[in-house]
Amino acid sequence: MPAVLFVGLLIIAGARVSSAQQAVDNAVAAAARAASIARSPDAAQQAGTRVARERLDREGLTCHTSSVSVDASQIAVGRAGQVRASLTCHVALSDLALPVPGGTDTITSTFTSPTDPYRGIP
């Protein structure tokens, strides 16, 4: 019986970690899409960071530390390009309902979104 209980707990732990990974994936995809419609690299960085943090809050994932990186160097109105967003989130395993005191898990994800060359052209 203890072995069955242990296997069940492992399955639940895997599901919680997978759910956290999916939340980070969704947040970074939304960040890249938001940044890809900005008109300047600075605006793209701000939009991507804001959207990533909002999406993590909406998903209910609490990052003890996180970093959002948006590479918007190819943004130029009237030109096609790509925006690449990366997100790293350090989550306490206890926040994932895992009985590991003091343990953390680092979840990272990257997404690339094409820019619309016609955005902002009247």
Image (cartoon, rainbow, N blue to C red):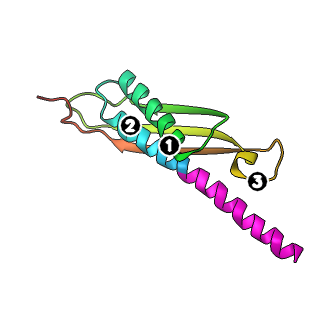
- Secondary structure of the residue carrying tag 1 is helix
> Horizontally, is 98 left or right of 37 in the view?
right
* Residue depicted at 81% across the width and 53% down the height: 99
Q: Earlier in the sequence, mark 1 or mark 2?
A: 1
| Residue labelled with disc 1 | 58
* Residue 13: quarter of image: bottom right
| Residue labelled with disc 3 | 98
> Horizontally, is 24 left or right of 35 in the view?
right
Q: Which residues are magenta?
A: 1-22
> Which SS does the magenta portion mostly show?
helix
Disc 1 to disc 2, how far (Cα)?
23 Å
Depicted 121 relative to depicted 113: above or below: above
| Residue labelled with disc 2 | 83
* Residue depicted at 59% across the width and 44% down the height: 61
Relative image position of residue 84 (x, y in whole percent): 43, 38
Q: Amino acid at mark 3?
A: Leu
* Residue depicted at 78% across the width and 71% down the height: 7
Q: Is residue 8 magenta?
A: yes
- Secondary structure of the residue carrying tag 2 is strand
Query: The N terminus is located in which quarter?
Result: bottom right
Q: Amino acid at mark 2?
A: Val
Please tell me which residue lies in front, 29 or 70: 29
Q: Earlier in the sequence, mark 3 or mark 1?
A: 1
Q: Is residue 6 magenta?
A: yes
Question: Pointer 1 and pointer 2: residues touching (CB < 8 Å)?
Answer: no
* Residue depicted at 42% across the width and 27% down the height: 45
Q: Earlier in the sequence, mark 2 or mark 3?
A: 2
